[in-house]
Amino acid sequence: MRQIILFLFISLAGQQASRAQYDFTSVTQLLTDSLGVIGQAGQNLGFMIVEGDSVIYKEYFGSWDDNTYQPIASGSKLPSMALIMNLIDEGILSPEQVVQDILPSFNGKPEMILHQLMSHTSGLPGNSAFIANNELSLQQAADSIGLVTPMTMFDPGTAFQYGGVSMHAAGRMAEVTSGLSWDALFQQRIGDPLGLTQTDYIGLGATTNYRIAGGMGTTMPEFARILVMLLQYGRYEDIQVIDSLTVMMMMEDQTGGLPLEGTPYANDPVRQDWRYGYGGWIEQELNGRTTQFGSQGAFGFTPWIDRCRNIACVFFTRRTLGIIQPTQTALRALVEEIIPVKLDAPEITLIGDQLQSNYPSGNQWFFNGNAIPGATAAVYTPNQNGVYSVMHISVEGCEVSSDNFTFTGVGIAETAELPGLSIFPNPACTSIDVFCPDGYRIYTPEGRLIRQDDSFTTRINISDLPQGLYFLKASGLTAEFVKQD
């Protein structure tokens, strides 16, 4: 599965000739000014930015340092679900796994699946006294949840209810299927590959009832390694910790448009409509792709990755969300202002009577500021005089626009043959035009082959495909297209 689209995820790093230098004076000033409000007793906090795999900003305020260990509450959900996704990669678990098949204590409840546990759509409540009892084991807590903790008013798969109970059950499923305790499993599959020595699940006290969704303790640099691994599509240094496609799945909306009946951001106008993936929130979405993803904790710990800027950020603090949120919001805005999107702006070249983008794919042409429907190829033939531009949309969903180009030519020239695999139109409803002299294969984002034809073709009927993203492979090249209704 890795081989199908791995090369698609190298674009951001390759676009930048060298790492730019940034002026973070305003960031430091904001945190200094906010320290008296958001600092813990002794006034401590930290902030770190990693660009690619290089630390470009790291400051502590107060007495904290690289060895300061703090509980991170719901920040735990992100590494916990990364571990579950690793087990899914190995076939040890499956998102469609029926919970009752692994945890018999749940037999008295409506049938639910692992996907629903991971996406908070299982119908289980957000909280239970069993997940906070350090005298229990994870096995005992999960069995008690199955036997005693009542369901919410929602059936599995009918509503989103955020919390820790469902992920607690998922953690126990991981123990049963792997044969290892949760802490040993995490260290083996995530901790050791990332070199984590100060990250564990006893941030809220010594226990074997590991709070999967809220009990991690860590340091700022160590958690940054987890983010960098996810930013690099599951790869850390020379180790593929999680499959690239699995990371994509983790960061896609997994709530299926269900009602948000329980969210910690219910009264937050900035965040109240955020959707959830596996272990984190879809904090920004562009062109159908998640471009910012994070997992904020109730103690104010706020990590996020920004694919368009190729950065991972950790805001390391321990106060309530109500106290830190204004500073965190302003901090993120400053970071976005200082660090530009990591894409080179497309350039338009006039060839005869045609306009050509220097990007072979991912284009959207505009005329007088308005998008031209279906104009997504590298070459566009204008049919009227005026101001043209082209936006490039990367595979990550990030976008950057060219300078305006004033066209005054007359006539329509014949389209030049372009290198690479070009699909038109894209998105498409019924068919796509693409040159496939040796046939083609179409894959789902999960890597499942759903269609193939070994004969010569220039037009492929896609009218019977469900709406969504697909990958087409032909002549040794791979490109994506979107089927829409």
Image: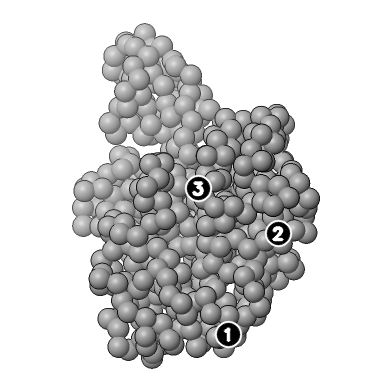
Q: Tell whether label 1 touches label 2 (CB within 8 Å).
A: no
In three-dimensional space, the C-alpha distance between marks 2 and 1, rounded to whole angstroms, equals 26 Å
Determine the CA span between mark 3 and mark 1: 31 Å
Residue density around tag 3, few if under 14, some if 14–19, many if 20 or more, within 10 Å: few
Q: Tell me which numbered mark, 2 or 3, is placed earlier along the sequence.
A: 2
Residue 103, compared with residue 119, is above or below; it is: below
Residue 89 left/right relative to 69: left
Q: How many labels were placed on the picture?
A: 3
Query: What residue is at 35 percent from the left and 73 percent from the top?
Result: 124
Instruction: Tell whether 332 sits left or right of 453.
Output: right
The residue at the point 46 percent across, 35 percent down is 399
Query: Disc 3 designates what residue?
Result: 322
Residue indicated by mark 2: 219
Element class at badge 2: loop
Q: Is residue 188 left or right of residue 359?
A: right
| Front-lying residue, 422 or 227 | 227
Q: Residue 208: x and y, percent?
A: 60, 82
Q: Name the amino acid type tagged 1.
A: Glu
Establish if 111 lies above or below 95: below
Residue under pointer 1: 135
Mark 3 is on which residue type? Gly
Question: Please, what is the three-letter code of the amino acid marked with disc 2?
Answer: Thr
Identify the residue at the far bottom of this view.
104
